[in-house]
Amino acid sequence: MHTLYLRTALFTLPQGGHVPVGAVILDGEILDRPAGCVAFKVATFRDDRGRALEGSGVELQIPWSKIDHIRVAEKA
């Protein structure tokens, strides 16, 4: 499991879209690291207070410039 912490929220329309409004913390799995971005399968979205947001199961390609840091969970 990986956690991506974004510099700014993912862009979406105020009435909703493919990602929830205010998503800045993404939990899930890195699928690939092609040039300039991270391909990521989102399991959960969270806001800047850590609260869960509705939505999951989306695959996104997020530019490195948008990512503040990535936490890699320890394997059991």
Image (spheres, rainbow, N blue to C red):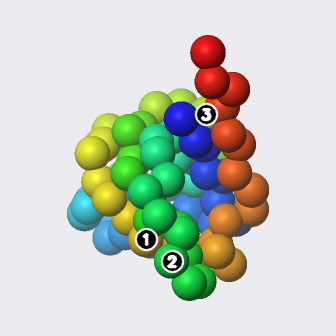
Q: CA distance from mark 2 to mark 3?
A: 28 Å
> In the image, what residue occupies the spot 60% across and 43% down?
3
Q: Which part of the image, by quadrant, shows the N terminus? A: top right
- Spot occupied by residue 34 in the image (x, y as percentages of width and height): 51, 77
Q: Residues within 10 Å of mark 1 (few under 14, many from 20)?
A: some
Q: CA distance from mark 1 to mark 2?
A: 9 Å
Instruction: Say which label, 1 or 2, has the lower sequence index.
Output: 2
Relative to 11, say whether 71 is above or below.
above
Instruction: Say which label, 3 or 1, has the lower sequence index.
Output: 3
Q: Is residue 33 visible?
A: yes
> In the image, what residue occupies the spot 56% across and 84% down?
35
The residue type indicated by label 2 comes to Pro
Q: SS for tag 3?
A: loop
Instruction: Say which label, 2 or 3, has the lower sequence index.
Output: 2
Answer with the quarter of the image where residue 75 lies. top right
The residue type indicated by label 1 comes to Gln
Image position of 58 (left or right of 76): left
Q: Residues within 10 Å of mark 3 (few under 14, many from 20)?
A: few
Q: Nearer the viewer, residue 37 or 14?
A: 37
Q: Are marks 1 and 2 in contact (CB under 8 Å)?
A: yes
Residue at mark 1:
61
The residue type indicated by label 3 comes to Gly
State the residue lying farthest toward the bottom: 35
Q: SS for tag 1?
A: strand
Residue at mark 2:
34
- Residue 44 is labelled as none
Q: Nearer the viewer, residue 11 or 15?
A: 11
Q: Which part of the image, by quadrant, shows the C terminus? A: top right
- Residue 50 is labelled as 3
Viewer-side label of 3, 1:
1
Answer with the quarter of the image where residue 11 lies. bottom left
Answer with the quarter of the image where residue 47 lies. top right
